Image: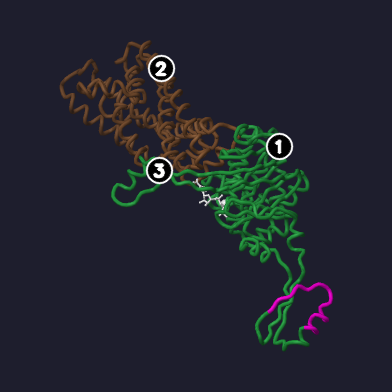
Chain colours: A brown, B green
Amino acid sequence: MTRIGLRLALAYRSNIVFMMVTLVAQVFLLRMIWTAVYGARTEAAGITLPQLLAYLTLANLQVFAMNTQVSRIISHRIRTGTVFFDLARPVGFMRQMTAFQAGNTLGGLLLLLPVVPVVLLVGSITAPAHLPGYVVTLVLGYAITVELALLISLIGFWTLETVWVAVLFRLVSQFFAGTMVPLAFFPGFLGALADVLPFKYMGYVPAGVYIGHITELVPTVLGELAWAAGLALLLQLIWSRAHRRVVIQGG
Amino acid sequence: MIRVEGLSKVFRRPRTFSGPFGTVRTLFTRQYEEKLAVDDVSFEIDEGEIVGYLGPNGAGKSTTIKMLTGILTPTGGSIEVNGLVPWRERTANARNVGVVFGQRSQLWWDLPLIESLRLVGALYDVRHFDKALSKVREILGLDGFLDTPVRQLSLGQRMRGDLAAAVLYEPPLLYLDEPTVGLDVLAKEAVREFIVETNRSGRTTVMLTTHDLADVEALCKRIILIDHGKVLFDGAIDALVNQPRRLVVELESGTRTYDIHDDLPGMVATIAAEHTIRDLSIVEPDLESVIKGIYAR
Ligand SMILES: Nc1ncnc2c1ncn2[C@@H]1O[C@H](COP(=O)(O)OP(=O)(O)OP(=O)(O)O)[C@@H](O)[C@H]1O
Ligand SMILES: [Mg+2]
């Protein structure tokens, strides 16, 4: 299944390449805007301009790399009824789909790799403040992202129309991941909301660790672990309900 | 191999409302519509048999097959397949069965055929994938298009790909739900040959659903007929078709039919002595008319 995911990512490469153009453009625009916003100031909310630019570059790269296809695939398979083949396999559906997404991400990374230098050049990068911390928060963030995507796609077992859910999810998650504005700049209520939502782990948290803005690593990683474990549990629960529904109602 | 007893399946769907806020009402309704898709079905299939599971559209054939594969739970009755209860021991059962739903494909549309076969190899732990592949490749003649994306395959090629995916791990049981749907005469012939070959060489048990009675005549000794979820007939085709030929005579008073037993010239002479015969023909019993007769009852 991993291999299928990878091959599909490569099969749709023109799509991904097109999206990479948008990525580069977005990073460039953000750099322009934020440089203008800072003007003569050297720092805001404890973040210097070079830090901020590195943050924005990384956060956008991360969210791009973590873009999941699994919801689209699952909703398509439910609508066409091919999900019955997946359910007839001797391997669990959730395992198959997770493997698929892992392969798909890997394929995306292969395509993204040559573009990374361009993005870093158009944006800006600094040396990492804490590399192991960055890697750990990033990997956990990825796990959370996949779990969320799987959770969203399970809605398809109740209502066949999930396109709007996926679009909404994408918009909300990108905003609260902090790809345009770091969460540290979010005002009062919005900041609190962003803090309780898990989307920050896609962008803000790993990138914040990288630039040295987030320094309390232990609580951060623990919080992330808790989210990953909690979502895994929730996923199991919802999946078993979804599965029971298919088994009884036939989709 | 397969034992089904008193099997039934009721689908329960939320009632759909029309009019303003219909969708919202549908989402929140507690009212359901029930549909009895399979109704008290019993049969047994022995190892090595090829059985035709026939019935008109909506009869409940696919629903039965889905219950046999374990992806649907029966509402009532019991199923045992190769000693397992499919819906309870779904994983173990999955390894024993290969499924083709002719109307759908298990192949990944945008990838070369070989990738879907590799996936099947991995999911079913096929140890010697290359050996298994070369075997199906030969009997199904996949050589020209293993590396072609599935969306570019002709229907016949795609169906062969689906059959390959279903038998790659050599399951002792095959459920083929309309494996010849939409195929031309030659492609149908190829699928039939493949089924016969798989059945003979591997003692594979086959349960076949089709609307093409030529498939049935070429492959099955036994058929099970269902309609409205109920079994109407279960037995040898020979017994069905082994009925007397019929003599159809057009008389001045109208058309009459007679069963022909032995002395055809004598029969004709007797009729001719009493009536004026305008035309006459002999009708051979055939599966189609026999089956139509059963549905009509
Ligand atoms: N998921 C479902 N929910 C509600 N009703 C269903 C569902 N699936 C099938 N049915 C109904 O159950 C009945 C049997 O359907 P089934 O697909 O088993 O028929 P079939 O014999 O395979 O027909 P066909 O020859 O057209 O393929 C039909 O009336 C169908 O509308
Ligand atoms: Mg059917």
- Whether residue B262 is situated above or below residue B136 in the rendered picture: below
Q: What amino acid is at disc 3?
A: Gln
B110 relative to B200 in the view: left or right: left
Label 3, ligand 1: CB separation under 8 Å: no
Q: Position of residue A22 (x, y in %)?
A: 33, 38
A129 relative to B182 in the view: left or right: left
Q: Share a chain, discs 2 and 1?
A: no
Q: Report the residue marked by disc 1.
A: B82
Count up the numbered dots: 3
Q: What amino acid is at disc 2?
A: Ala
In the depicted view, which residue is nearer to us: B45 or A1? B45
Q: Position of residue B141 (x, y in %)?
A: 69, 51
> In whole angstroms, how far apart are the C-alphas of marks 1 and 3?
39 Å
Tell me, yes or no, whether the highlighted magenta stretch contains residue A4: no
Q: Residue at x 75, y 50 (%)?
A: B197
Snapshot quadrant of residue B48: top right
Magenta stretch, residue numbers: B256-270
> In whole angstroms, how far apart are the C-alphas of marks 2 and 1?
44 Å
Q: Report the residue marked by disc 3.
A: B31
In the depicted view, which residue is nearer to us: A178 or B279? B279
Marked residue nearer the N-terminal end (1 or 3): 3
Chain of the residue under label 2: A
Chain of the residue under label 3: B
- Label 1, secondary structure: give it: loop
Q: Report the residue marked by disc 2.
A: A226
Q: Residue at x 84, y 77 (%)?
A: B263
Residue B49 seen from this side: yes
B134 relative to A193 in the view: left or right: right
The mark closer to the camera, 3 or 2, is 3
Q: Are marks 3 and 2 in contact (CB under 8 Å)?
A: no
